[in-house]
Image (cartoon, rainbow, N blue to C red):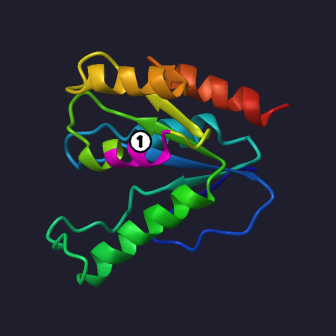
Amino acid sequence: MMIEIKAPEKIPESDKVKIFLAGSIEMGMASDWQKIVVDRLQEEPVVLLNPRRDDWDSTWEQRKDHPQFREQVEWELDALAASDYILLYLDPATKSPISLLEMGLYAQSGKLFVVCPEGFWRKGNVDIVCEKYGFPQFFSLDAAIDHLMSLVIK
């Protein structure tokens, strides 16, 4: 039942709940936490928007005029906007500056759920922002997935 859309695939029009998997990707440093979410939500009526790109090439220049890089960034921005929920996971083994940017962009959206385990380098900042803007924060990925499932399965 679950549909996974990976960057840069077209984001479908769908009546299913769309969940953007924001958070740590830093290849070689971040765990593939997105796979855990995909596996757990396999039987649920959701569309997962996964920015972890199978053909990512770390030699791509991070400039706005680099076509593949621009395609990735624009896909992520479109997926964030199209999502009903944003599950943001901050892996303690990473810095994840773009994930923090995404958290700031959507802090007041009402659709953000954050997982920030102990050890993340800016956990204090994340804790305060979550508290100030009143969006849910979870201390494990499993707890966040359970909560999302409770919203999807009504």
Looking at the rendering, which quadrant does residue 76 occupy?
bottom left
Apparent side of residue 22 relative to residue 152 in the rendered image (left or right): left
Q: Residue furthest front?
A: 132
Comparing 121 with 1, the one in front is 121
Q: Secondary structure at mark 1?
A: helix
Apparent side of residue 119 relative to residue 106 in the rendered image (left or right): left
Residue at image mark 1: 103
Residue under the image location 34 percent in, 33 percent down: 90
- What residue type is disc 1 on? Met
Q: Is residue 116 in view from this perspective? A: no
Q: Residue furthest right?
A: 154
Please determine whether, in this image, residue 53 is positioned above or below residue 112: below
Looking at the rendering, which quadrant does residue 110 occupy?
top right
Residue 56 image position (x, y, % from top left): 29, 66
Comparing 131 with 6, the one in front is 131
Residue under the image location 29 percent in, 25 percent down: 125
Residue under the image location 31 percent in, 78 percent down: 68
Residue 83 image position (x, y, % from top left): 62, 53
Comparing 34 with 91, the one in front is 91
Tell me the chief SS of the magenta region: helix
Residue 6 image position (x, y, % from top left): 49, 62
Q: How many marks?
A: 1
Looking at the rendering, which quadrant does residue 139 occupy?
top left
**The C terminus is located in which quarter?**
top right
Report the span colored magenta: 101-107
Q: Please check the rendered image and state whether residue 112 is part of the magenta-colored stretch, yes or no.
A: no
